[in-house]
Image (tube, helix red, strand yellow):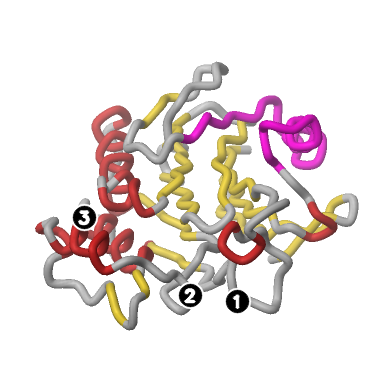
């Protein structure tokens, strides 16, 4: 479901007390934390969505996972079980992955570019959630948001070889015609944890070539591109 707030569009999903959101670039809504505009928009999330706090990270294309504590850490995945707290990550082509357990009310947001995907950050995040909160793996749900998809994600063959050198990706069809399929890699990570495939939802939206939404794309815009904020919270 799309919702519009102050002329800004968000792609929104709800699952009882869990609220999943992917911002778009409609009317140039920008969440770049290196600008005052981006910081103001993050603060606006509180009013727009009725949450008490907004969490995010200084992303480093790593596999570092952080528990939300109100401090801005370096890392690429953030976890919390605190209600009324939005946690999210920034993208402009990389893959945003939002994870939750409805029954235990635990949520996570993951930034998975090619380096994070290579180091299996989504797999590690799900494993950490399970170890910390003792969640039944079949209760985990995952949303994969807009990113530079296999239709457009041009990627060097020499670097793609690093993926095939990983046992988890070795037998997957993830590189074809000079393009890399990050989503297939991420779905493999998810199912390797034991999460049922039916619990994975992909928006199937490419930041580069889609015509339905205004989206930021580093590869398409090159300069003056903003950041989208993909976030999740517990009511």
Local crowd at mark 1 within 10 Å, few (<14), some, or many (≥20)?
some
1 vs 3, front mark? 1
> Mark 2 and mark 1 in contact (Cβ < 8 Å)?
yes
* Residue beneath disc 1: 209
53 within the magenta span: yes
Identify the image quadrant of the N terminus. bottom right
Q: Is residue 160 above or below residue 28?
A: below
Residue at x 31% of width, y 63% of height: 187
Q: Secondary structure at mark 1?
A: loop
Give how far across and how far down residue 63 sits, in percent: 32, 37
Q: Is residue 163 left or right of residue 107?
A: left
Give how far across and how far down residue 18 sits, in percent: 56, 46
Local crowd at mark 2 within 10 Å, few (<14), some, or many (≥20)?
some
Between the C-alphas of marks 1 and 3, the distance is 32 Å
Give how far across and how far down residue 158 sits, in percent: 23, 63
Label located before the other in sequence (2 or 3): 2
Between the C-alphas of marks 1 and 2, the distance is 7 Å
Q: Which residues are magenta?
A: 31-59
Give how far across and how far down residue 180 sits, in percent: 34, 70
Q: Is residue 28 left or right of residue 105?
A: right
Q: Nearer the viewer, residue 151 or 47?
A: 151
Local crowd at mark 3 within 10 Å, few (<14), some, or many (≥20)?
some
Disc number at residue 194?
3
Residue 72 falls in which quadrant of the image? Answer: top right
Disc number at residue 152?
2
Label located before the other in sequence (1 or 3): 3
Q: Nearer the viewer, residue 75 or 50?
A: 75
Residue at x 68% of width, y 62% of height: 215
Q: Secondary structure at mark 2?
A: loop
């Amino acid at each position: 479901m799309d919702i519009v707030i102050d002329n800004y569009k968000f792609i929104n999903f709800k699952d009882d007390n869990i609220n999943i959101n992917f911002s778009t670039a409609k009317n140039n809504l920008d969440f770049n934390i290196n600008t005052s505009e981006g910081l103001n928009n993050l603060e606006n999330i509180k009013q727009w969505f009725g949450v008490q706090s907004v969490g995010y990270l200084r992303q480093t294309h790593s596999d570092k996972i952080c528990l939300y504590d109100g401090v801005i850490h370096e890392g690429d995945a953030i976890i919390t079980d605190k209600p009324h707290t939005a946690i999210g990550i920034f993208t402009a082509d990389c893959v945003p992955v939002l994870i939750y357990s409805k029954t235990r009310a635990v949520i996570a947001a993951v930034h998975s570019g090619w380096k994070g995907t290579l180091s299996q950050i989504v797999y590690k995040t799900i494993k950490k959630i399970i170890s910390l909160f003792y969640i039944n793996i079949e209760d985990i749900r995952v949303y994969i948001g807009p990113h530079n998809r296999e239709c457009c994600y041009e990627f060097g063959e020499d670097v793609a070889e690093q993926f095939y050198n990983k046992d988890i990706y070795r037998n997957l069809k993830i590189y074809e015609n000079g393009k890399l399929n990050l989503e297939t890699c991420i779905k493999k990570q998810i199912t390797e944890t034991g999460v049922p495939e039916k619990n994975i939802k992909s928006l199937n939206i490419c930041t580069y070539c889609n015509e339905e939404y205004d989206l930021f794309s580093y590869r398409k815009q090159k300069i003056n591109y903003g950041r989208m904020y993909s976030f999740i919270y517990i009511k």
